Image (cartoon, rainbow, N blue to C red):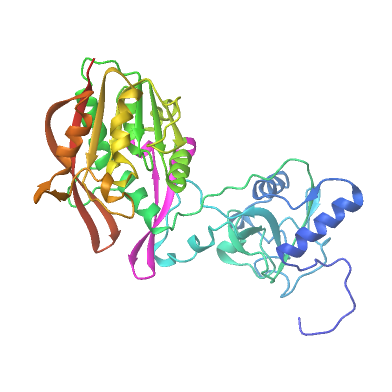
Amino acid sequence: MASEIDMPWNWPVEVNYLEAKAFCSWKSALSGSPIRLPSEDEWHRLRDISFLPDQQQWDAAPGNINLEWWASPCPVDRFKNGDFFDVIGNVWQWTETPIYPFHGFEIHPWYDDFSTPTFDTRHNLFMGGSWISTGNEATRDARYAFRRHFFQHAGFRYVECAAPVIIHDDQYESDALTAQYCDAHYGPEHFGVANFQAACARICLDNMGGQTMGHALDLGCALGRSSFELAHGGFRQVTGLDFSTRFFRLAARMQEECYLRYALPEEGDVVSFHEISLAELELESARDRVQFFQGDACNLPEKFSGYDLVLAANLIDRLYSPRRFLATIHERLNPGGLLVLTSPYTWLEEYTKKEEWLGGFREAGEPVWSLDGVKAALAPHFRLIGEPQDVPFVIRETRRKFQHTVAQLTVWKLEG
């Protein structure tokens, strides 16, 4: 390592990922063939067909690995494994696969900052170990990834293959608001307060007794928990709609992949990592009857019509025109259909101009309450079913800070 020697042309070339990829591009242009780095799965296939035992079954290392041969690289044609050389050892082999967590991945408390910071699509896996890889780094299932400019004991082999590499975009959601909603929708209960989305769906289903349960609309669905619960409870089809691109994207991912990952702040810069799934909540069977769209509740396209239930949970005090919404929502319901509203009535001018507020102000010196404003807006088309009820919910901000809010829920039946 510390000597100057003539160029050993049969030794591995040590490069970073960017240089390896650039070589593949040059080779592909020169040959006219699709040349690229292998994926993680392709490397495992290479190892499988080379019939290499894992470390525990070695009598002697079948490659320049585990410090069993030299304290440096060696010629690439020294160790043959089936039809190939240097399947393991000598230098790490770059792949096209950014590292991602497998389903069920759990963080070891002694290494809570080891893997998760690399799940950012900017750290690529390299496989096979190098001459200095020992212990678990020398095993078949070792998964190590580094930034693409990293340069140490790493080389590459290439494949001729036209098939695209599948990139698993499985980052942990670290945006504070989306992480909070991941936890609020699918995470554990806090302080004994039932999951708000599940509670709203259950109240909706209880009020549907004897009525057609064809198509439901979950307006302001956020990450979609209520939509899945409504489908699981018996609706043949449920449409979830939210204005937020971030929320829509995560709801659609949950519907497609059945799981989400997120990072929650614990204290300062310390975070914890979580995985949630539909299977854990016994909701996976409902996903085929749920679909999500991004849209504006105050300006819905005509296709969003013909519903037996519309749930608008904690929506009206975040609309720019709640009066227009309430004045037109009857057009979306089938005769006799139900409208279920919840809101903590936290009116803020950043969302809703004051002239659009349904309550929370004084008129002729007297307070106007939001429930009265809702009743007045819905009176031309709806009848209130039962009494308003309080539904609490808790949103976790950090390990020691939580929001405890109480929303008012009302159920309305479309008359005529």
Q: Pick the quarter of the image with the C terminus.
A: top left
Residue 184: x and y in percent read 30, 48
Residue 343: x and y in percent read 23, 43
Position of 214 with respect to 99 (left or right) is left
Q: What span is in magenta? A: 256-281
* Residue 283 belongs to magenta span: no
Q: Residue at x 58, y 47 (%)?
A: 168
User: Magenta residues: mostly which secondary structure?
Assistant: strand
* Residue 268 belongs to magenta span: yes
Number of numbered discs present? 0
Q: Pick the quarter of the image with the N terminus.
A: bottom right
Q: Is any atom of residue 224 visible in this view?
A: yes
For the residue pair 271 and 111, the one nearer the viewer reads as: 271
For the residue pair 54 and 224, the one nearer the viewer reads as: 224
Q: Is any atom of residue 314 visible in this view?
A: no
Q: Which residue is drawn at 17% across and 43% down?
A: 370
Q: Residue at x 91, y 53 (%)?
A: 30
Q: In which quarter of the image is residue 149?
A: bottom right
Against 326, is 50 above or below? below
Q: In which quarter of the image is residue 19?
A: bottom right
Q: Which residue lies furthest to the left in this view?
A: 366
For the residue pair 117 and 154, the one nearer the viewer reads as: 117
Position of 337 with respect to 375 (left or right) is right
Residue 8: x and y in percent read 88, 72
Residue 295: x and y in percent read 44, 38
Against 361, is 241 above or below? above
